[in-house]
Amino acid sequence: MMMVEDIKKDFNKSLKEIQENTAKELQVLKEKQENTIKQVEVLTEKEEKTYKQVMEMNKTILDLKREVDTIKKTQSEATLEIETLGKKSGTIDLSISNRIQEMEERISGAEDSIENIGTTIKENGKCKKILTQNIQEIQDTIRRPNVRIIGVDENEDFQLKGPANIFNKIIEENFPNLKNEMHMNIQEAYRTPNR
């Protein structure tokens, strides 16, 4: 009997251990199940986000396809327009080249005229200088001035520089401050011919 009781005790003890182990394993399984449920929820959320992103990408791809089609259509229209403009530009190029030729002819004519005018101006300048010298010589022989510079020889140097320049030189040498203080301008100066 004792043995039966010992067996009962051992059996009860083993049964308790099995129950405790089973309860622990059941608890671990519940925790694993909860973790798995959480992971499934996270994966479901990720799957939904991915699905939304895929849908948005599909929509973007469709929009891009439409845009590419529009660009192709615009490009073909532009190509046709360029071809028609190319045909039209052939006639326009001819008229433009004719106009350019006319303008070049006009420009060359104007350049020739400018050259002629330039030579005429130079010739007129020379004539003016000669006429001015002639007038000066005539005035020098006809007029007699009120002021005569005594002591200045009427040599070639005097005749080349003229009486006005000689008079300015004399003023600078003898009255240096006078030239700085006031502006002096000789109105007329003539040489008296030798008689």
Image (cartoon, grey):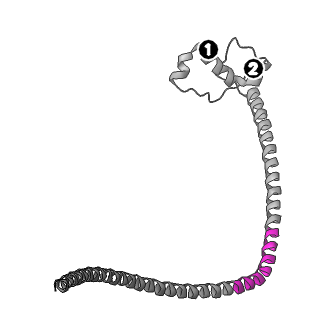
Report the number of numbered marks: 2
Residue 80 on the magenta segment = yes
What residue type is disc 2 on? Phe
Q: Tell me if residue 195 can be seen.
A: no
Report which residue position mark 1 lands on.
Answer: 173
Q: Position of residue 59 (x, y in %)?
A: 50, 87
Mark closest to the chain's N terminus, 2 or 1: 2
Tell me if 63 is positioned left or right of 47 in this view. right
* Quadrant where the image shows the C terminus: top right
Near-viewer residue (46 or 162): 46
The residue lying at 75 percent from left, 35 percent from top is 132
Q: Position of residue 35 (x, y in %)?
A: 32, 80
Q: Which structural element holds mark 1? A: helix
Q: Position of residue 79 (x, y in %)?
A: 71, 84
The residue lying at 77 percent from left, 24 percent from top is 160
Near-viewer residue (111 or 143): 111
Q: Main secondary structure of the magenta part?
A: helix
What residue type is disc 1 on? Glu
Report which residue position mark 2 lands on.
Answer: 158
- In magenta, the rendered stretch is 79-102
Q: Residue furthest front?
A: 1
Near-viewer residue (116 or 157): 116
Q: Which structural element holds mark 2? A: helix
The residue lying at 52 percent from left, 25 percent from top is 182
Tell me if 63 is positioned left or right of 28 in this view. right
Near-viewer residue (164 or 9): 9
